[in-house]
Amino acid sequence: MSLTLNLLRWLVFITAALVMNFPVLSTLITSLKTSAEISSNPGLWVFKPTFENYALALQVTERLNIFAYLGNSLAAASIGAVLPIILAFPAAYAVARHGYGRNFLLPVIVNLRTMPLVIFAIPLYMMYQWLGLLDTRLGLGLILTIVNLPLALMVLVNAISEIPEELDEAARIDGAGIGHIILRIIAPVCRPALATTAIFGFIMAWNEFLFGLMLTTRDAVPMTVGASFFFAAAGGGVQWGVAAAVMIIAALPPVLLGLVMYRQISNSLTAGAVKG
């Protein structure tokens, strides 16, 4: 009976995994097919696997440069992952410890993330044009910082709220100032939450498409926007194999980061769920 139950569980698990990851599997399989096989065999089977599409995707031409797109995304996503933590951590401490903005400011900032980002398109474009930040990695990173700020603030407020205030009081008795308490007492304890915030921020920033399309044209084009250029790279219709290869390459950094840091994310999200 137990063997049958375990087999049934695995069957349900494998079926759910295949269903949820069907688009990824389909894209991966398409990237391993030649153009002729894509036309004759649209199914989920590869008769003659090839890496030609990846070789074409990695070729640098005057119009297409996947390495530049990856570099732009890495720079902008790094800014969009780290800077929100620097800005949100002191604010989160003020909210969690002293209640500043808990009833008004915090809900307003968090709810900003629920609004469609396209609402901010026109004023942001005009402001960036005036500041000279259009088509720059810094400009893209700054807007990604704003996008990730509500998430960072919410996670860090919850994390600091779970830390006993006695730690702060003991540090004050020893003569520690507010800066020392935040950096030397609170930050080390919040390390799992800080890491999780940075990981989620990086993934969200990497996958951002709207602002990359709106605020960049050539020098700072991110991977999400640059990937769309490969759909008609040869000018003679969509090269599905090459496009699929580019999408797999574009998805690798956040996927690998999530897999490597899975245990860290899991521990942070479950921390405080059970209190003794």
Image (spheres, rainbow, N blue to C red):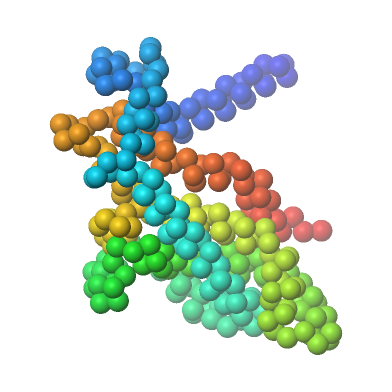
**How many marks do you count on the picture?**
0
Q: Is residue 110 left or right of residue 90?
A: left
Percent x, y of residue 265 = 62, 50
Q: Is residue 45 left or right of residue 64?
A: right
* Quadrant hosting residue 10: top right
Residue drawn at x 45%, y 66% as measured from the top left? 145
- Residue occupying the far top of the picture: 47
Q: Is residue 96 visible from the viewing direction of this image?
A: yes
Tell which of 132 and 9 is nearer to you.
132
Q: Quadrant of the N terminus?
A: top right
Percent x, y of residue 197 = 57, 59
Percent x, y of residue 134 = 28, 67
Q: Quadrant of the C terminus?
A: bottom right
* Quadrant hosting residue 188: bottom right
- Residue occupying the far left of the picture: 236
Q: Is residue 154 visible from the viewing direction of this image?
A: no
* Quadrant hosting residue 75: bottom left
Tell which of 125 and 21 is nearer to you.
125
- Vertical relation: 206 (above or below) 165: above
Residue drawn at x 47%, y 40% as measured from the top left? 252
- Vertical relation: 72 (above or below) 56: below
Percent x, y of residue 65 = 32, 45
Residue drawn at x 74%, y 55% as measured from the top left? 274
Residue drawn at x 36%, y 30% as measured from the top left? 55
- Vertical relation: 38 (above or below) 68: above
